[in-house]
Amino acid sequence: MRIFISGPSGVGKSTIIREILSLNQDLVLSISYTTRTPRPQEKHGREYFFIGRDEFESMIDRGDFLEWACVHDRFYGTSLKWIESQESLGKDILFDIDVQGVRQAQEKGSPGTYILIIPPTMEDLRARLSGRGTEDRDTIDLRLKNAREELKNWGLYEYLVINDKLEDAVQKVQGIISSARCSRSEIIGRIPWLQKIE
């Protein structure tokens, strides 16, 4: 099963994902390929698969990615082979993904549950971004502009979860995942004998 979670910067998506992963030991976070340089604490195959630009471009040409993007002259992408290897082990996969990635995944017909985390209001999102104390006003304004663009794409998602209170938002996302695991397509995929009953 594939769970796709998106949300604008400052909405609390990363915190929700961290909580969901702690509640679901059989759920793995998708690991992307990237051409950027590893940071000091990052390890190849844990945070990302770090590869060169030529290799990444070859993977694009071969159609190896479910989705990919170029952000600030660095490439990021989700390998279809990696996804299939995890699914063959019976793992469910959680994708921390942006709107462009969701669009690509859907264009390729990827099955899954698509969830968008949204703020209660744009004013609330501004307050959260300002409260971090890590960005200047211009950066905050740019993040809010980008958030509006992302949120315009709400129609791509099956579920919209308002993060007005973290515990409630986590509970709602967990409920969506539990429900998706009981969907007809998911159950038939796990126990195909059911279709053969006469």
Image: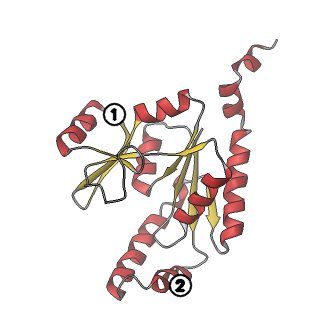
Q: Of the residues under marks 2 and 1, which one precedes in the sequence?
A: 1
Residue named by callout 2: 123
Mark 2 lies on a secondary structure that is helix
Outermost front residue: 41
Where residue 158 sits: x, y (%)? 61, 52
17 or 181, nearer to the observer = 17
Counting every numbered tag in the picture gives 2
Q: Is residue 69 above or below residue 13?
A: above
Where residue 130 sits: x, y (%)? 46, 85
Left or right, 50 with respect to 186, comes to left
10 Å crowding of disc 1: few (<14), some (14-19), many (20+): some
Number of the label disc, if any, that sits on residue 64: 1
Mark 1 lies on a secondary structure that is loop
Left or right, 121 with respect to 61, comes to right
Residue type indicated by callout 2: Glu
Where residue 28 sits: x, y (%)? 55, 44
Residue found 72% across the figure and 46% down from its top: 178
